[in-house]
Image (spheres, rainbow, N blue to C red):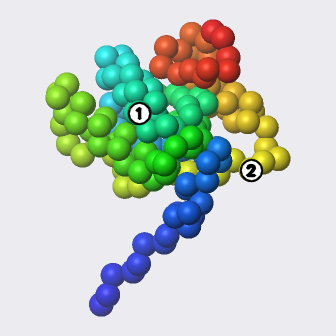
Amino acid sequence: MPQPRRKCIRLSPDAYKIPGQPFSITLCVADRRPVFGDPALAREAVDLLIASSSECGVALHAYCVMPDHIHVLCSLNGDTGVVEFVRLLKGRLATALRRLGVTGHLWQRSFHDRAVRREENLFKVIQYILHNPVRAGLVEDWQLYPFSGSPYLDR
């Protein structure tokens, strides 16, 4: 009996390369293991995220490294598409975390993404991402969470 085909959850490849199009992306750790609950690993993830986005020409609007997943709000400024950026980031994070002692498969297959519509308020999406640690009960004030940020908001 043939295996059922996986449902394609991606937009058309061209949709991921529209300059200036903001995307809300979530990368989940395999089995929802709280790998980034270790502050050193969470800091490594933040540093690699910022460096990779800069290198790829991806504008980073907001990010939040949670214990078992990472939220990113970004848009394209260069030739790198969202899929290529996520592939690069996941690979670099997996390599760095293995070097720091993390074993086993790191990421869930693929990633969740949503193109932010023009009529949506980008600031509301940024607030949603930055308030994730508050909703999860990790901190009482989003400004106290050390593994999130946005160039649009001061702490």
The residue drawn where x is 17% and y is 29% is 99
Name the element at disc 2.
Answer: loop
Q: Point out the tag, 2 or 1, that comes first from the N-terminus.
A: 1
Location of residue 6 with respect to 80 vertically, above or below: below
Give left or right: position of 104 versus 22: left
Query: Could you say where residue 39 lies in the image, as x and y percent from the top left?
Result: 36, 16
Mark 2 → mark 1, Cα distance in angstroms = 26 Å
Q: Please state which of residues 37 and 137 is positioned toward the viewer in this rendering.
A: 37
> Which residue is more in the foreground, 118 or 124?
118
Label count reads: 2
Looking at the image, which is closer to me, 75 or 154? 75
- The kind of secondary structure element at disc 1 is helix
Between circles 2 and 1, the one closer to the viewer is 1
- Residue 132, percent from left and from top: 59, 28
Instruction: Please state if 97 lies on the left or on the right of 57 as rendered.
Output: left
In the picture of the structure, the residue carrying the numbered disc 2 is 117
Q: Position of residue 54 (x, y in %)?
A: 46, 30
Kindly identify which numbered label has been placed on residue 55: 1
